[in-house]
Image (tube, rainbow, N blue to C red):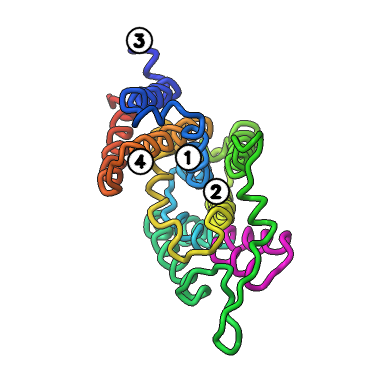
């Protein structure tokens, strides 16, 4: 039994099982046993889960990205601005937002790989910059369907079809489009990490950066691409967030980086890099999603949920520690 639990997958599944058991013990008037509860738990975890996939790429390389929540907020504002206020075609609005998110991630990657800044400092700077840019672009207000005219009056426009598509549900309303996008992101990231040379390079860099460099790995390029990919996925999450809220909120995504890191760590990916995987992040996302849903059903205050998340992160890191000889 002890040997089996040494596997990261086994530990991640055990954490998920414990959370589900808590739901069974505290079902909140049998709400936990309803299909809608599980559907909503997966839907609510999907946006942060997309962020966690990007975070996995960065953490595997031995880095960290604190800017994902701010990039989400920036792209949510831009997507609403392009689609609702400026009424751009859907493909152009999506492409522009993907480029914005990728550019933010690329900037962080260049600060880390070329200027040799610590990932914490580089992404902290991007976190502050992106949040400020979101507030500047939006004028400090939510970008919604109320559009201000030149004379100061307001007119209301319809929610764009792209928003309705992203916020739609499939299979009789039991599967949200955001969850489908999340699972697609998991699949793509899984293929890149297990089948592509870039994925193997990320593992090598996280395991021992100097050894990877001496082995011929393009360390700077691979690390930069990891941050760019993280920014790209943050942009996808931002568009999904805007569609769900039917507006672009410059404050959206605040604190999401904490949950994204928690999903990665609880899944079993080592914060030191080199060990883990995207399927573990999927398990971690389900664990955090169900935990938040169960706490919400039982009316646990948000402050207590945040404190509990912090405790869980510490506990997850402690379980990853290995004895050094």
Residue to which mark 3 is pinned: 1
- Going from N to C along the chain, the mark reached first, 3 or 1, is 3
Which secondary structure, mark 4?
helix
Whether 146 is drawn above or below 287: the answer is: below
Q: Residue visible at 51% across and 73% down?
A: 138
Q: Cα distance, mark 3 to mark 1?
A: 28 Å
Which secondary structure, mark 2?
helix
Whether residue 158 is visible here, answered yes or no, is: yes
- Going from N to C along the chain, the mark reached first, 4 or 1, is 1
Q: Cα distance, mark 4 to mark 1?
A: 31 Å
Name the dominant secondary structure of the magenta segment.
helix
Tell me where residue 289 sits by quadrant.
top left
Let me know if residue 155 is in the magenta part.
no
Residue to which mark 4 is pinned: 296
Q: Position of residue 97 (x, y in %)?
A: 62, 61
Residue to which mark 2 is pinned: 226
- Going from N to C along the chain, the mark reached first, 2 or 1, is 1
Horizontal placement of 5 versus 286: left or right?
Answer: left
Q: Which residues are magenta?
A: 76-102
From the image, state whether disc 4 or disc 3 is nearer to you: 4
Q: Residues within 10 Å of mark 3 (few under 14, many from 20)?
A: few
């Amino acid at each position: 039994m002890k040997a089996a639990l040494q596997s990261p997958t086994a530990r991640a599944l055990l954490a998920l099982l414990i959370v589900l058991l808590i739901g069974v013990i505290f079902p909140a008037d049998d709400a936990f046993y309803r299909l809608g509860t599980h559907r909503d738990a997966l839907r609510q975890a999907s946006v942060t889960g997309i962020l966690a996939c990007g975070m996995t790429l960065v953490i595997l390389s031995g880095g960290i990205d604190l800017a994902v929540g701010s990039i989400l907020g920036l792209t949510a504002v831009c997507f609403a601005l392009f689609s609702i206020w400026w009424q751009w075609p859907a493909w152009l609005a999506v492409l522009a937002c993907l480029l914005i998110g990728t550019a933010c991630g690329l900037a962080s990657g260049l600060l880390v790989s070329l200027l040799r800044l610590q990932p914490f400092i580089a992404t902290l700077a991007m976190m502050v910059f992106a949040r400020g840019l979101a507030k500047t672009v939006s004028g400090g207000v939510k970008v919604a369907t109320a559009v201000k005219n030149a004379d100061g009056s307001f007119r209301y426009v319809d929610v764009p079809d792209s928003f309705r598509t992203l916020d739609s549900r499939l299979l009789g309303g039991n599967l949200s489009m955001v969850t489908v996008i999340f699972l697609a992101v998991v699949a793509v990231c899984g293929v890149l990490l297990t089948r592509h040379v870039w994925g193997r390079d990320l593992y090598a860099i996280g395991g021992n950066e100097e050894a990877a460099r001496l082995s011929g790995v393009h360390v700077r390029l691979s690390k930069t691409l990891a941050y760019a990919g993280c920014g790209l996925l943050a942009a996808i999450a931002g568009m999904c967030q805007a569609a769900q809220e039917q507006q672009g909120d410059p404050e959206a995504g605040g604190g999401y980086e904490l949950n994204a890191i928690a999903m990665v760590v609880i899944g079993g990916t080592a914060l030191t890099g080199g060990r883990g995987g995207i399927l573990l992040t999927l398990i971690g996302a389900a664990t955090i999603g169900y935990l938040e849903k169960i706490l919400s059903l039982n009316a646990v205050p948000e402050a207590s949920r945040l404190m509990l998340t912090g405790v869980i992160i510490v506990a997850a890191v402690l379980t990853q520690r290995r004895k050094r000889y």
